[in-house]
Image: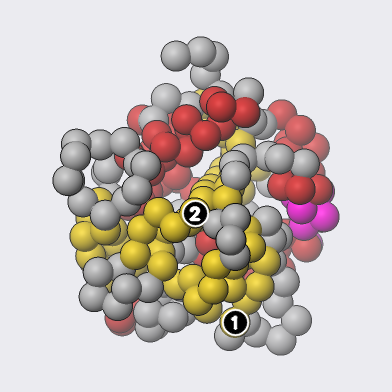
Amino acid sequence: MGPVPVIGVLAIQGDVVEHVRALGEAGARAVRVRRPDELDAIDGLVIPGGESTTIWKLARAFDLSEPLRKRLAGGLPAFGSCAGMIMLADRLRDGIGGQETFGGIDMTVRRNAFGRQVDSFESDIELTDVAGPPGQPFRAIFIRAPWVEEAGPAVEILGTESATGRIVAVRQGPLLATAFHPELTGDARVHRHFVDIVRERT
């Protein structure tokens, strides 16, 4: 099994507590990250769901944006759910004026693509390479969710939403992103998959 990885959860906005719980269930030690120096003490990072424009503004206010970009460019494993997927995208559609991302995954993501809060829904997703009983889909929760409109050649598509065929789960190297919220399901398979990615790098 190896040592227990230390995985940070970006704790400036969003569903932090749920990710901390899911990471613990997946065999990691989860810590909250709010300051640039805390990035140096982690083996991986989760960027939670929430509101991408608020995460962007607060990351700038906390002087986290540039240190985080450097750690990601240097190979830090990261997992982004919903707003976190937006923050890991190299390109963004329907962002507010001047909105930036941390980047790292060669994809174009559209904000709120599946609709507003009232359009939240659940859907069964077949996830490639995510450990679990064969043929057992992942019951995904979408809340004002983005989708991936374009993915570069280095991006591995792990899952699509069945009704629309839209890309909702991807991986590029040590970076993982989902348009849905696995931390809200009680199903730790996606978090275990990310913990395995972190272990590969430590």
The answer to whether the residue labelled 1 contacts the one labelled 2, judged by CB atoms less than 8 Å apart, is no
> Magenta region: which residues?
61-69
Is 198 in the magenta?
no
- Marking on residue 175: none
Q: Nearer the viewer, residue 154 or 169?
A: 154
Q: Nearer the viewer, residue 167 or 77?
A: 167
Q: Nearer the viewer, mark 1 or mark 2?
A: 2
Is 119 placed left or right of 31 in the picture?
Answer: left
Q: Residues within 10 Å of mark 1 (few under 14, many from 20)?
A: some
User: Residue 193: in sight, yes or no?
Assistant: yes
Residue pictured at 27% horizontal, 43% vertical: 187
Residue denoted by label 1: 93
Q: Main secondary structure of the magenta part?
A: helix
Q: Nearer the viewer, residue 200 or 35?
A: 200
Label 2's element? strand
Q: Horizontal and vertical percent for residue 175?
A: 58, 47
Amino acid at pointer 2: Glu
Q: Looking at the figure, which quarter contains the N terminus? A: top left
Figure check: 90 above or below 170: below
Q: Horizontal and vertical percent for residue 194?
A: 47, 38
Residue 168 occupies quadrant: bottom left
Residue pictured at 30% horizontal, 62% vertical: 141
User: Residue 80: in sight, yes or no?
Assistant: no
Residue pictured at 48% horizontal, 32% vertical: 195
Q: Earlier in the sequence, mark 1 or mark 2?
A: 1
Label 1's element? strand
Residue denoted by label 2: 156
Q: Looking at the figure, which quarter contains the C terminus? A: top right
Amino acid at pointer 1: Arg
